[in-house]
Image (spheres, rainbow, N blue to C red):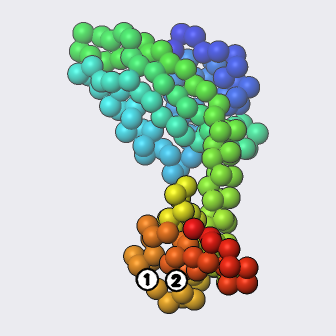
């Protein structure tokens, strides 16, 4: 039983507060199929008769207009019958859709960057502040004909870059 459900719940989820005050069913039917088993498991643990624990989950819920909303919900049972059955729960749900979209954009960006670096037909090195090599791409491995273990941790100047510039004689170390 949830005697109070914020009117904002309807705006975020597209479900009227009245529809969920006495029955969580309308929420369960809208949870994304990939998220439902974890949601149900967490809910069962939180509401079990031996006292349970705090319920916390991130999941997708289909809004009544059809789009998916990411929610972070946290709550717990605060009142039980003598047999341990829950009678009153409190909790809060937060719309985390923007955060999830940003996380996905970052993940895709990182994947694109990683693919670009690993597939590039140019030498790409990353140097630590002390000038030692801490990354080389596969093309660098092939062109330099050395295993990464032979170069990682070594100074770039003196191992793959000559210590003295050939045209000017400038000392690069």
Looking at the image, which is closer to me, 130 or 34?
A: 130
Lateral position of residue 20 relative to residue 170, left or right: left
Lateral position of residue 65 relative to residue 128, left or right: right
Give the residue furthest to the front: 169
Figure quadrant of residue 89: top left
Residue for point 70% across, 19% down: 8
Neighbour class for label 1 at 10 Å: few (<14), some, many (≥20)?
A: few
Lateral position of residue 65 relative to residue 89, left or right: right
- Total count of labels: 2
Q: Are marks 1 and 2 in contact (CB under 8 Å)?
A: yes
Looking at the image, which is closer to me, 46 or 65?
A: 46
User: Tag 1's secondary structure?
Assistant: loop
Q: Is residue 1 visible?
A: no
Give coordinates of residue 74: x percent, y percent: 48, 25
Image: 124 above or below 33: below
Neighbour class for label 2 at 10 Å: few (<14), some, many (≥20)?
A: some
Residue for point 72% across, 44% down: 67
Q: Which residue is mark 1?
A: 147
User: Tag 2's secondary structure?
Assistant: helix
Question: In the rendered structure, which disc, 1 or 2, sits on the residue that comes first in sequence?
Answer: 2
Give coordinates of residue 117: x percent, y percent: 64, 72
Give coordinates of residue 68: x percent, y percent: 68, 43
Q: Which residue is mark 2?
A: 141
């Amino acid at each position: 039983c949830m005697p109070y459900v914020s009117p904002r719940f309807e705006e975020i989820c597209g479900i009227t507060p009245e529809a969920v005050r006495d029955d969580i069913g309308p929420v369960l039917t809208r949870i994304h199929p990939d998220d439902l088993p974890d949601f149900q498991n967490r809910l069962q643990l939180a509401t079990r008769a031996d006292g349970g624990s705090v319920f916390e989950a991130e999941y997708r819920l289909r809004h009544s207009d059809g789009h998916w909303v990411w929610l972070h919900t946290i709550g717990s049972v605060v009142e039980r019958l003598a047999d341990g059955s829950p009678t009153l729960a409190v909790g809060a749900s937060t719309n985390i859709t923007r955060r999830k979209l940003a996380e996905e954009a970052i993940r895709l960006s990182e994947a694109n960057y990683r693919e670009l670096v690993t597939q590039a037909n140019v030498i790409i090195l990353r140097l630590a502040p002390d000038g030692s090599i801490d990354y080389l791409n596969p093309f660098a491995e092939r062109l330099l004909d050395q295993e990464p273990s032979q170069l990682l941790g070594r100074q770039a100047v003196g191992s793959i870059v000559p210590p003295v510039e050939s045209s000017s004689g400038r000392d690069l170390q």
